[in-house]
Image (spheres, helix red, strand yellow):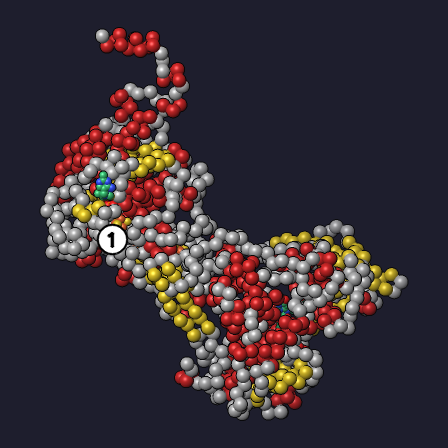
């Protein structure tokens, strides 16, 4: 951290987006995390993604639980809505908010402790309900905020800073998310913004439950040589299956690379994602293939990153529930309280 | 999952770009590298350590700030009011915000608020070194030579045709810009060193004769004393009311002229014209106009000089070429001007071409001609080994200031034509080094390297021994004296100077560009924390490449080619760290954020080496 606020002065050539904002306008308060924390890079990537998408900051809601990762919404999108919930309860607060107002962009930011330990049940149900959101887990394999205890995503055999080995099986949140019905699932690395920023943009654009497991080294407690979530280890074992370009409305769709290395994936809403494929033959639209590939590469000791699964026919919670599209805060008394005649009608239909 | 192979090794296997494809790592041991980052110091001809003195002012250490200046530029009080300030257009602040730091006027804050500096000034040694050096002219160039050589034991003799020292600082710069006491004080500090004999009132009419007096070396600092005249019809007939600007200004300075007509035309667009018009305004010229051939932007005067003149109600008329002086009853009555416009010729050069409109006549009582200054060396014989070029300028080595007669050195306006005080000082320092080497039989062309130190400013995790917070204040204006007073009194200084409070606020705008970002490749874990925090997008981690290509794909494109890229050796991922020095705020946030201390903020202090009186091997 630093005691200085980041000076307002910026590069004279800093670009502006369609709204006339610069990237700096999407920043938040200066981070209080440890210097070098991967979480700060993820905040940087979120800032960049929102800037590039020209999102009006007041249309975004950031929600989080407890942990260093869950503190980060303070450090980006300073002009957006925010809710810092209790430990592990971000998913239900987000679900509730989304039910009440589907017009905001929901960004759930959590940690591996927040989501894979205390909040595991909340995580599961939020995903399987198909809440339209971006759910990012800033995964460092430890409880950073409480000084580095192993979290449920720590790999078996990986050692703590003091040299104690982890005996328990890790939870792979990516595999869980695919199984639970997330319609956009990705893994990335805080140290690879080239991959991460487009993934966040695509996740924001995706209508449905989008989950990103982002490996994010904890410099204070989990960046030593025997860690499997250190900068060096992740760099050495990172197997990116693809890199993504988000095709925004005005961009021309061209395939300039050699055939077979680039694929256009059409989404349900008619938009396209451009995939630069690194692992030949990897098909992110097949659930079974994705599951197989993930397990196989895990056995080989690799960390697979990229867009891992995409359901092109995604739908969200509101589609299933048939809820009213207007945000509740915009409904008048007449709609919210239609009167005793309407109640009688409902009751009659249930008799 | 944890194999034998350590994570580090695995990363080392990462692909690297082909050798030779990219920029070589920056050699920060080359003193020029970090010196260039200190834009103001690099731009200052005397290389004054600007941020160092600005911090001293902020700390209230005015005397120390003054002495830092005095060592480099010799005339802080004078320059703090009059310098041409090449440092300010170079100042980094001007690239990240509207205006540069008021570097020049802060110098004056140090001068105005210092205590007695006598104890810090050098004294001539009791035992002399037996060498005698003659200095012709007592302007800033000669005085700098005297200051550098007298403390080393040289016996100095200064000749000047005027009665007092200071050269054009005294004869030309008007008192409302520079009070006489300031000149007396700072010229006095030099003469007070001792071993300096001033032969004021003695003009040198023959260099040959002076050479015959057996000085060990002679320095010529006689300036560019001749004002260019305007030979157009009516010049002779109207002569009584047509004055050469610099002659007129010195006559005013020395009290020989005390008034001028009511309507005055000043011809010319340089700083001399600005001083002429403002002086005329104070001597009875109610209607003073400056008339210039060129456009407003192309005028040679500094922007602030033009502003000051206009602020005193003096209009500047552009694109008018003087064609003739008109007379009435045998007396000057006006000037006829041809109207011109700027056009590009077929080679793309700007040309002033007549518009064809009718000529304009502007009536006046007096004209001041300020259209340029020339050198004149009628007193230097052409058969004493000093070669002149076809423009009548002596052939002088730009590094050593030596002429083709190895005993004779030049500096200031006499060397390469009219410049300004700070260049005269810089020449003086170089000439003193050469004279010292020459007198000791050393090769004058090997120059002493500057003295540099590079010291970490880290005091604690978030503490630095410099104030790294960035002030967002805009440039402060120097308070001015009420015009009701200043326009009536030639000697009333117009600028009142910053008081301590304003001065302090202005110091906070300085970005401390001498506190360098120093990168240690081996410590970097490539976490990107520095990239994310940097407010001005200076830092990029990327694959190396040729400079012109690399410049295009940084965090922000590095389009200012005058600013260097700081490139590291290859990192573990095979990428390199590239920092564009252009708009770095020197805020230290990269170093505060870096988990491993790969970035450190280190103060780079560069002091120019002046004449030392010792062979290179004995210098401290
Ligand atoms: C009107 C005007 C305003 C200026 N304002 C500024 C300003 O605001 N800031 C700035 O930086 N610069 C200014 N300058 C320029 C600056 O004054 C000169 O560049 C500077 O003084 C040059 O210094 P110097 O040491 O070369 O010689 P000078 O200052 O020109 O001094 C030369 C001295 O040599 C003497 N001399 C000449 N020939 C002989 C001889 N044969 N024998 C004996 N003595 C001789 C002269 O009497 C004179 O005293 C101004 C110039 C003019 C004309
Ligand atoms: C109900 C409850 N139980 C326990 C805690 C203590 N606690 C605070 S943060 C944290 C773990 C956070 O880990 P993670 O989500 O991985 O965040 P990180 O700090 O690693 O980013 C725990 C257990 C708490 N705040 N509240
Ligand atoms: S403790 Fe770890 S997770 Fe928390 S801020 Fe520090 S480095 Fe980041
Ligand atoms: S000191 Fe560091 S963080 Fe600050 S502007 Fe310069 S490079 Fe950026
Ligand atoms: S913060 Fe330090 S360790 Fe991290 S990338 Fe920058 S220099 Fe390297
Ligand atoms: Mg964690």
Foreground: A215 or B341?
A215
Q: Which residue is mark 1?
A: A220
Asked if one can make out residue A239 in the rendered structure from this viewpoint, the answer is no
Mark 1 surroundings: few (<14), some (14-19) or many (≥20) residues within 10 A: some
* Front residue of B278 and A29: A29
Judge left or right: residue A276 versus residue B449. Answer: left
Whole-percent x and y of residue A220? 24, 53
Q: Give the quarter of the figure containing the C terminus of chain A.
A: top left
Q: Quadrant of residue A182?
A: top left
Give the residue displayed 47% in from the left and 74% down from the top: B608
The percent coordinates of residue B147 (x first, y second) are 56, 80
Q: Which residue is at 37% across, 55% downward?
A: B589
* Residue B195 vertical placement versus B391 (above, below): below
Q: Position of residue B487 (x, y in %)?
A: 73, 60
Image point (45%, 80%), residue name: B446
Q: Nearer the viewer, residue B14 or B79?
A: B79
Q: Residue at x 28, y 22 (%)?
A: A319
* Image position of B427 with respect to A326: above or below: below
Q: Is residue A92 visible?
A: yes
| Nearer the observer, A62 or A186 | A62
**Where B26 sits versus B338, above or below?**
below
Tell me the quarter of the picture where residue B206 sits. Answer: bottom right
User: Disc 1, ligand 3: is the CB inside 8 Å?
Assistant: yes
What percent of the width, then of the height, locates residue A22?
A: 43, 43
Q: Is residue A211 left or right of residue A79?
A: left
Image-based side of B431 in relation to A286, left or right: right
The secondary element bearing badge 1 is classed as: loop
Q: Looking at this rendering, what residue extends furthest in the right direction?
A: B329
Q: Quadrant of ligand 2?
A: top left
Judging from the image, mark 1 belongs to the subunit labelled A
């Amino acid at each position: 951290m630093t005691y200085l606020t980041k000076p307002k002065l910026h590069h004279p050539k800093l670009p502006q987006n369609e709204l006339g904002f610069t990237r700096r306008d999407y920043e938040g308060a200066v981070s209080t995390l440890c210097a070098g924390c991967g979480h700060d890079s993820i905040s940087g990537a979120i800032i960049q993604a929102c800037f590039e998408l020209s999102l009006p900051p007041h249309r975004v809601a950031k929600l989080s639980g407890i942990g260093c990762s869950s503190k980060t919404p303070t450090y980006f999108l300073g002009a957006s809505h925010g809710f810092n919930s209790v430990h592990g309860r971000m998913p239900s607060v987000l679900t509730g908010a989304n039910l009440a107002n589907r017009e905001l962009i929901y960004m759930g930011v959590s940690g591996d402790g927040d989501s894979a330990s205390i909040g595991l049940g909340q995580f599961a149900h939020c995903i399987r309900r198909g809440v339209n959101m971006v759910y990012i887990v800033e995964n460092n394999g430890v409880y950073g905020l409480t000084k580095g205890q192993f979290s449920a995503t720590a790999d078996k055999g990986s050692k703590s800073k003091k040299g104690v080995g982890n005996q328990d099986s890790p939870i792979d949140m990516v595999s869980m998310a695919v199984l639970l019905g997330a319609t956009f699932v990705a893994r990335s690395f805080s140290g690879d913004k080239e991959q991460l920023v487009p993934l966040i943009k695509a996740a924001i654009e995706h209508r449905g439950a989008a989950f990103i497991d982002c490996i994010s080294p904890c410099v204070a407690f989990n960046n030593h040589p025997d860690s499997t979530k250190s900068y060096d280890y992740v760099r050495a074992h990172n197997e990116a299956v693809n890199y993504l370009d988000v095709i925004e409305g005005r961009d021309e769709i061209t395939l300039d690379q050699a055939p077979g290395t680039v694929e256009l994936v059409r989404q349900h809403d008619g938009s396209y994602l451009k995939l630069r494929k690194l692992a030949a033959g990897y098909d992110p639209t097949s659930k079974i293939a994705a599951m197989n590939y993930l397990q196989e590469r895990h056995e080989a000791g690799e960390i697979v990153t990229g867009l891992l699964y995409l359901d092109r026919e995604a739908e969200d919670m509101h589609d299933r529930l048939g809820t009213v599209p207007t945000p509740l805060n915009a409904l008048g008394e007449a709609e919210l309280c239609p009167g005793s005649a309407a109640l009688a009608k409902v009751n009659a239909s249930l008799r | 999952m944890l194999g034998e192979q350590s994570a580090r090794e695995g990363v080392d296997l990462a692909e690297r770009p082909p050798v030779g494809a990219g920029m070589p790592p920056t050699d920060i041991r080359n003193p020029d590298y970090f010196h260039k980052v200190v834009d103001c110091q690099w731009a200052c001809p005397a290389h004054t350590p600007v941020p160092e003195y600005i911090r001293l002012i902020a700390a209230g250490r005015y005397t120390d700030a003054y002495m830092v200046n005095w060592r480099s530029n010799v005339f802080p009080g004078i320059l703090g009011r009059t310098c041409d300030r090449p440092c300010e257009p170079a100042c980094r602040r001007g690239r990240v915000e509207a205006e540069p730091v008021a570097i020049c006027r802060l110098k004056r804050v140090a001068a105005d608020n210092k205590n007695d500096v006598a104890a810090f000034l050098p004294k001539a040694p009791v035992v002399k070194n037996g060498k005698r050096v003659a200095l012709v002219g007592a302007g800033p160039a000669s005085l700098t030579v005297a200051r550098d050589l007298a403390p080393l034991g040289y016996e100095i003799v200064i000749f000047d045709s005027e009665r007092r020292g200071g050269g054009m600082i005294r004869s030309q710069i008007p008192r409302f810009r520079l009070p006489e006491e300031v000149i007396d004080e700072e010229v006095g500090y030099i003469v007070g060193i001792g071993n300096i004999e001033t032969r004021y009132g003695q003009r040198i009419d023959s260099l040959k004769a002076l050479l015959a007096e057996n000085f060990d070396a002679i320095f010529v600092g006689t300036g560019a004393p001749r004002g260019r005249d305007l030979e157009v019809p009516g010049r002779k007939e109207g002569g009584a009311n047509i004055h050469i600007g610099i002659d007129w200004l010195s006559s005013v300075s020395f009290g020989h002229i005390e008034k001028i007509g009511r309507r005055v035309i000043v011809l010319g667009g340089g700083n001399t014209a600005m001083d002429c018009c403002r002086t005329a305004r104070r001597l009875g010229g109610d209607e003073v106009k400056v008339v210039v051939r060129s456009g407003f932007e192309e005028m040679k005067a500094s922007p602030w000089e033009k502003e000051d003149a206009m602020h005193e109600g003096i209009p500047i008329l552009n694109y008018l070429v003087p064609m003739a002086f008109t007379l009435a009853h045998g007396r000057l009555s006006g000037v006829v001007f041809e109207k011109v416009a700027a056009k590009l010729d077929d080679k793309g050069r700007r040309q002033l071409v007549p518009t064809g409109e009718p000529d304009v006549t502007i009536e006046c009582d007096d004209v001041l001609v300020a259209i340029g200054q020339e050198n004149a060396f009628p007193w230097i014989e052409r058969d004493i080994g000093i070669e002149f070029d076809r423009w009548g300028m002596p052939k002088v080595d730009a590094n050593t200031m030596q002429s083709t007669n190895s005993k004779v050195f030049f500096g200031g306006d006499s060397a390469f034509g009219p410049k300004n005080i700070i260049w005269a000082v810089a020449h003086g320092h170089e000439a003193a080094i050469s004279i010292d080497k020459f007198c000791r039989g050393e090769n004058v062309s090997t120059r002493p390297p500057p003295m540099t130190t590079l010291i970490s400013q880290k005091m604690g995790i978030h503490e630095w021994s410099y104030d790294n917070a960035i002030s967002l204040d805009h440039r402060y204006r120097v308070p001015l004296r009420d015009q009701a007073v200043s326009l009536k009194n030639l000697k009333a200084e117009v600028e009142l100077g910053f008081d301590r409070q304003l001065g302090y606020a202005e110091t906070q705008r300085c970005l401390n560009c001498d506190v360098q970002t120093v990168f240690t490749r081996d410590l970097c874990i490539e976490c990107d924390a520095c990239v994310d925090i940097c407010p001005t997008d200076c830092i990029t981690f990327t694959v190396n490449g040729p400079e012109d290509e690399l410049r295009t794909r940084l965090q922000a494109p590095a389009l200012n080619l005058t600013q260097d890229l700081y490139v590291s050796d290859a990192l573990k991922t095979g990428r390199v760290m590239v920092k564009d020095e252009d708009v770095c705020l020197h805020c230290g946030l990269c170093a505060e954020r870096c988990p491993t201390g790969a970035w450190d903020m280190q103060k780079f202090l560069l002091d120019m080496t002046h004449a030392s009186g010792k062979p290179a091997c004995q210098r401290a």
